[in-house]
Image: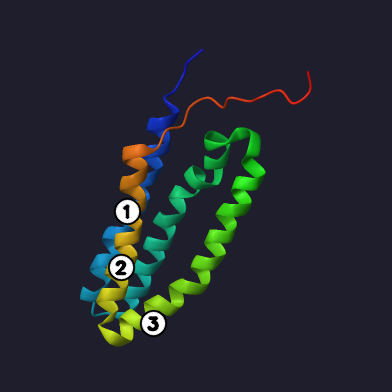
Amino acid sequence: LRTHDRTRISKLFLLSFGGAAVILVLLYRVASPLTLVFMFCIAALLMTGATPVYASGALNLVPCSAGSFVGVQNTIANISGVLAPVITGYLAARYSWAAAFSATAAVCWIGVLSYLLMGKAGPAKTETVFS
């Protein structure tokens, strides 16, 4: 039976998220609309590479309350879905699109670095509800 380090595997998934952040920083230097769309598509594809990490994170963090944790996680995601276009529009209008893309890349890197420094994925500890 072969065992794997779940924390290391989870952290490897975040490399794609960091790659998307790099692409976002480079977007404002692209002159061709076709290249810009292509780079957006690659960045979006790379961002989805981290989905297994944050989709299963609730099971690693709070296995007995994973449903409640996912509810809070989705609430924060929905609030972000409302605030992100407002903040992006403000940054683009006030400064430039480069500022908007750089802010998005910064958020990506903050997430990656925080998980690299503090994230752990170990075997789920479950509590027995019924004795």
* Residue at image mark 2: 103
C-alpha distance separating marks 2 and 1: 10 Å
Q: Residues within 10 Å of mark 2 (few under 14, many from 20)?
A: some
C-alpha distance separating marks 2 and 3: 12 Å
Q: Nearer the viewer, residue 99 or 26?
A: 99
Q: Nearer the viewer, residue 17 or 41?
A: 17
Q: Position of residue 84 (x, y in %)?
A: 44, 72
Q: Nearer the viewer, residue 111 or 64?
A: 64
Residue drawn at point x = 34 percent, y = 46 percent: 114
Q: Amino acid at mark 3?
A: Gly
Q: In what element is the residue under mark 1?
A: helix
Q: Nearer the viewer, residue 102 or 90?
A: 90
Q: Amino acid at mark 1?
A: Ile
Dot placed on the residue nearer the N-terminal end, 2 or 1 = 2
Q: Position of residue 95 (x, y in %)?
A: 25, 83
Q: Amino acid at mark 2?
A: Ala
- Tag 2 near tag 3, CB within 8 Å: no
C-alpha distance separating marks 1 and 3: 21 Å
Q: Is residue 126 left or right of residue 14?
A: right
- Tag 1 near tag 3, CB within 8 Å: no
Does residue 36 sit above or below 110 in this rendering? below
* Residue at image mark 3: 89
Give me the disc on residue 110.
1
Give me the disc on residue 14.
none
Q: Position of residue 10 (x, y in %)?
A: 42, 37
